[in-house]
């Protein structure tokens, strides 16, 4: 089966050079306040895309070009933390947009939050400390002094569904909502391939061994900059032994005894639902 990622921004295309002076009718804006986006929820489905021109005095800083879709050009802009949104718009975390706006618009909103965070965190060069500016040929920033180029960071992480007969291994993080369980996940370390990351993370967090790794799909996870790579694996041996830090509980569950699992807009939920349907 093919996994359809929730936060992938295609068909939003980062066309370069940026279109010059598109007409107001072709412009759409995503407004970011802190780490949330402004949402107009009524009528349903809602929208995070505001037409041009923006209300006077609402945005601060320079607009950030995101890309194009069909004949429209998309931009992001920041709203000051204390500013009141216009009319019936209100701030919403990106994760809360699922089901409230079309999935494609949710992806654009998450991309806007991520790119504004990239611009803020790389406003000064990590090599010499001078100011940077956006490149006009690709998504990157270049130092105005030493010409060092910085690209948006992508942090690869694995997530794995472990099967044993008709059961699946789910684990609980201390930070999870009460009673909720999820899959084993962890970041790729320098020098590892993704399969090695799966074996290491599973061993470290729950103490078991796995085999027969199969690729499931991937998901950009903009919280803030991960790329989640999903696998399915078979249990190969060992007793569950949680690490007590990242994982406080782990158990085998059948389809009839599943606990609360993560929300729909995640590759975790997609993996679990594929297992429920016996597709993996």
Image: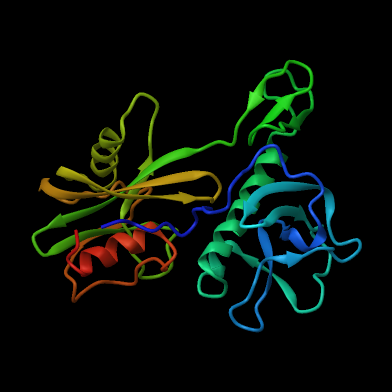
Task: Name the quarter where the C terminus is drawn.
Answer: bottom left
Q: Quadrant of residue 149?
A: top right
* Protein image colouring: rainbow
The location of residue 268, given as percent across then percent down, is 35, 59
**Residue at left 67%, top 24%?**
126
For this view, does 144 lie left or right of residue 229? right
- Tell me if residue 179 can be seen: yes
On screen, residue 31 above or below 153: below
Q: Nearer the viewer, residue 246 or 200?
A: 200
Q: In this rendering, would 269 be left or right of 145?
A: left
Q: Furthest-right residue in view?
A: 56
Which of these two is toward me, 56 or 93? 56
Does 158 sit above or below residue 266?
A: above
Q: Position of residue 150 (x, y in %)?
A: 63, 28
Q: Which of the 4 image quadrants contains residue 3? A: bottom left
Q: Quadrant of residue 156?
A: top left
Could you tell me residue 263's position as x and y percent?
42, 68
Residue 265: x %, y % from top left: 44, 64
Please tell me whether residue 128 is drawn above or below residue 221 in the rendered image: above
- Image quadrant containing the N terminus: bottom left
């Amino acid at each position: 089966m093919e996994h359809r990622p929730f936060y992938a921004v295609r068909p939003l295309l980062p066309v370069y050079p940026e279109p010059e002076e598109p007409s107001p009718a072709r412009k759409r804006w995503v407004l970011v306040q802190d780490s949330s986006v402004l949402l107009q929820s009524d009528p349903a489905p809602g929208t995070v895309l505001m037409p041009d021109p923006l209300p006077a005095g609402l945005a601060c800083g320079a607009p950030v070009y995101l890309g194009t879709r069909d004949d429209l050009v998309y931009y992001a802009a920041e709203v000051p933390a204390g500013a009141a949104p216009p009319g019936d718009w209100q701030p919403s975390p990106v994760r809360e947009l699922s089901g409230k706006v079309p999935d494609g618009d949710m992806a654009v909103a998450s991309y806007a939050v991520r790119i504004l965070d990239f611009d803020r965190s790389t406003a000064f060069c990590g090599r010499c400390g001078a100011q940077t500016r956006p490149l006009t040929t690709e998504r990157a920033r270049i130092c105005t002094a030493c010409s060092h180029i910085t690209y948006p960071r992508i942090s690869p992480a694995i997530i794995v569904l472990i099967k044993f007969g008709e059961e699946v291994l789910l684990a609980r993080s201390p930070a999870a909502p009460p009673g909720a369980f999820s899959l084993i996940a962890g970041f790729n370390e320098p020098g590892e391939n993704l399969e090695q990351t799966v074996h290491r993370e599973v061993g470290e967090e729950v103490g078991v061994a796995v085999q027969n790794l199969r690729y499931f799909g991937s998901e950009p996870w903009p919280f803030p900059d991960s790329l989640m790579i999903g696998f399915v694996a078979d249990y190969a041996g060992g007793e569950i032994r949680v690490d007590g830090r990242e994982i406080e509980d782990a158990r085998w569950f059948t389809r009839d005894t599943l606990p609360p699992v993560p929300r729909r807009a995640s590759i975790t939920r997609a993996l679990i639902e594929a297992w429920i349907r016996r597709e993996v």
